[in-house]
Image (spheres, rainbow, N blue to C red):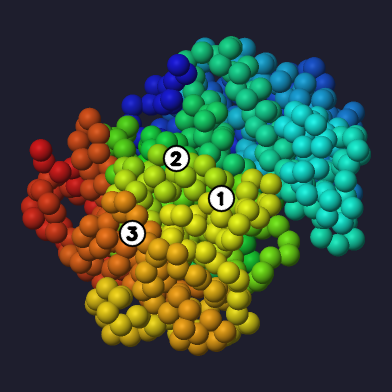
Amino acid sequence: MPETTPKGLTGLAFGGDYNPEQWPQSVWHEDVRLMREAGVTMLSVGVFSWALLEPEPGTYAFGWLDRVLDLLHENGVRVALGTPTVAPPAWFYRAHPDALPVAADGTRYEFGSRGAICHSNAEYRTAAADITTRLAMRYADHPALALWHVHNEYGVPVSACYCESCAVWFRRWLSRTYQTVDALNEAWGTAFWGQRYADFDQINPPRVTPTVGNPAQALDYRRFADATMRENFTAERDILHRLAPGIPVTTNFMTALSQCDSVDYWAWGREVDLVANDHYLITDGRRTHVNLAMAADLTRSVAGGAPWLLLEHATSGVSWQPRNPAKAPGQMARNSLAHVARGSDGAMFFQWRQSRRGAEKFHSAMLPHAGTDSRVWREVVELGASVDALAQVRGTRTVADVAMLWDWHSWWAQSLQWRPSEDHDPRERADAFYEALYDRHLTVDFAHPEADLSAYPLVVVPALYLTTSAAGDNLKEYVAGGGTLVVSYFSGIVDEHDALHEGPHPGPLRDVLGLTVEEFSPLLKDDRVRVLRTPGRSPAVAGEDRELIGDVWTEFVVPRGAETICTYGDGLTAGHPAITRHRLGQGSAWYVSTRLTSRGLDTLLGWAADDARIAPRAELPPEVEVVRRTGESGTFLFVINHAATDAKVPLDAPGAELLTGERAATCLALPPGAVRVVRLDG
Ligand code: GAL
């Protein structure tokens, strides 16, 4: 079994990307002095260094990297060593211009940035294997080596290449997947618009077409592109395992859907020794700490609940959004420790020292351009001490309350063209359901639709357009066995080939939900409908709302065993069911056929939580995040006050507060913006 924790790291990882090649050697000595001051324990090194390590084909210059690794080792810093295969040198592209990827419209990308890779290119594969082999042979036994950091963020900035080589590979992938071209014709529905193929050789990547292309072809191309990248990762991983046994191998994911949606991280999570993630706040006006929590929960879920590693985030502003605000005082620590609360065994950044040159010189760093007499530096030093104080948290697991179903293949299918309404954004629904659960202080695990769900009292399904029959059976078994399920509209629609399931919608969810959907009736922009409680049916809820509000989508729902909890008050669907509940076996399955506002979602989830016997956490103040990690070293309660007011959080046991060193008795008092971590007694 490969190792799963960075070798030689005894506490949590604290550090970032270190790019000493951008600086004269005199600066390196200042770097290590300041790293000691900040409590740095691990750095990612060499992620983009191929052109420096192999300045000419077959000529290697490892001397500088030897000195960097030695220096870091002498200063007690562990190293996550990059394989620099995301940035092949200029000479490589001169010799092999076909390794540059091609966009769907035929444009070939140029050298001069990073990540310009056609993953099916044979010369690239050979060269990547070669530099990986050289690095492994040279550094396998270096005492600083803790972890391999392969490549960088597979899937961005280029998620698929559409060149001729990829066309050949795609055909091969298709013939392996479908065996016969007739099976492909059937699965892709090529009878429509006369797209029938007589031979695999006639099939191309889904390049630009006059109007919408075959959806199943586009969906398969995403699967093919993802699998091809994964093959390149596993090729490097296998070299590293062979030549450097005992050193775990990772690559940095970007699980936040808005940052990378081209990779099926369920599949990738099975290939890495340790799941690692990069996360950057998207400042689009929404509550960034909720998006952060969601990405962290998803990363932990991809890791199967095991501890993972935050390999990159930012000390303050980034530089690639339209507007890049600085983080507020204390926000960095809240961000970093929220990741730790949700399962990361460390907090690492892009990057150690802010660059003076290049594309990312305006991006914040641990050591900012302003130097050490700066707020960011002081907060970095303080965070280093906090991370050090949390060493015993390492290896413990975050405790989740509920599950949300999540499937990249369904996202891919859902994002294909020509749908009933462009206003239905399934990702928005996932965010909204997550936020509603977050505000109820429930910690969320994400689960694949075919995974065992029996451990969760409540499972929510905000958007599962592509639902396999196996997933439908799984949900039925879950509910019959006593689970509570909440499904939102436009789920259970297509199979794995984007073909509508036989019979009425929602195909494999009909039985579990006890209903059929006769017709979709999306709303026009800005239209709203009232969702009225059925007298005597809707459970009593706190609050004044007699009616809920929906927009974007309505449906003609026909109950077939389900009871109607709310009906539509307006529009074409007036009088028809809007929210239903189906009691099945020991459990119940809720269905909502419109896009509820956040208040409406909260009401719905309140009803479902009652069914699931999840007690409301009324004692917890709003905007206070409370997450538990537990394991052999104890149970740790992370409490993060995102509010601008004092907060009081009752404790179910007294304990030791690890960041202040104080005792915590029955109640924890937090000033605005503060973080506390209590190791509960017992
Ligand atoms: C990451 C990337 C880093 C750096 C960072 C800036 O996606 O891995 O190399 O570019 O973004 O936010």
Return the disc, 1 or 3, that comes first in the chain's sequence: 1
**Which residue is label 2 attached to?**
451
* Percent of width and height locating residue 6: 43, 26
Label 1 CB-ligand 1 distance < 8 A: no
Q: Is residue 591 above or below residue 220?
A: below
Name the residue rendered at 59%, 65% in the picture: 425
Q: CA distance from mark 1 to mark 2?
A: 13 Å
The answer, for residue 203, to whether it is visible in the render is: yes
Name the residue rendered at 20%, 36% in the picture: 634
Determine which of the numbered discs, if any, sits on residue 583 in the image.
Answer: 3
Which amino acid lies under the numbered mark 1 shown in the image of this protein?
A: Thr
**Which residue is label 1 attached to?**
467
- Which of the pair 73/482 is nearer the observer? 482
- Quadrant for the N terminus in the image: top left
Labels 1 and 2 touching (C-beta < 8 A): no
Q: CA distance from mark 1 to mark 3?
A: 21 Å
Q: Quadrant of residue 667?
A: bottom left
Asked if residue 673 lies left or right of residue 174, the reply is left
